[in-house]
Image (tube, helix red, strand yellow):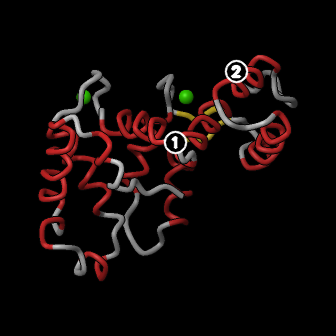
Amino acid sequence: MGNSKSGALSKEILEDLKLNTKYTEDELCKWYESFQKQCPDGRISRSEFEKIYANFFPNSDPKVYARHVFRSFDTNDDGTLDFREYIIALHLTSSGKTDLKLEWAFSLFDVDRNGEISKNEVLEIVTAIFKMIPPEEQKNLPDDENTPQKRADKLWAYFDKGDTGNCCSFTLPSP
Ligand SMILES: [Ca+2]
Ligand SMILES: [Ca+2]
């Protein structure tokens, strides 16, 4: 509660992020500066995060999906994203590396965090993703992907086969 105004980035977090992301010290300090400007209290709340998504996807309903994405980034489960979680999120979603994207996709789909992905969890996330597709675009979807259930079945088939390489062709929307 308003202790430390946390001006500078702590050495510990900086070293940790340098080690775990592709970003340089310079870049991290710049990110930190803009993060502090946008979130003077050093944290992003769930509703702030939902607002960010709403701005990026004005023609659809990203709220549920944003909530799932938030959960997948809030690794310590305290209901806010701190700078470290924010940067890791950025790193995971913007990196071209398949294994990182998979890692993130896994935590996104594992809704109850039990270390496994169930068919219901796949359907839950796919339904949320579906809401982000504007209605006029939904009409143009191929026949075997034009409902959340069909898409979930298709994706589940990939998971089931352990064919994780293919599951990445299923793009996860992120700003
Ligand atoms: Ca957190
Ligand atoms: Ca699970």
Secondary structure type for disc 2 = helix
Find residue 17 and report its horizontal and vertical position in percent.
Answer: 69, 27
Find residue 66 and report its horizontal and vertical position in percent.
Answer: 43, 50
Tell me the amino acid under the disc marked 2: Asp
Q: Which of the pair 122/59 is nearer the observer?
A: 122
Judge left or right: residue 118 versus residue 166: left
Which residue position is annotated with label 2?
Answer: 16
Q: Residue furthest top?
A: 12
Whereabouts is ligand 2, in terms of quadrant? Answer: top left
Quote the CA–CA distance across marks 1 and 2: 19 Å
Find residue 165 and report its horizontal and vertical position in percent.
Answer: 32, 43
Identify the residue shown where x is 16% and y is 37%.
Answer: 161
Q: Which of the pair 4/64 is nearer the observer?
A: 64
Picture quadrant of residue 130: bottom left
Tell me the amino acid under the disc marked 1: Lys
Which residue position is annotated with label 1?
Answer: 97
Secondary structure type for disc 1 = loop
Identify the residue shown where x is 51% and y is 22%.
Answer: 76
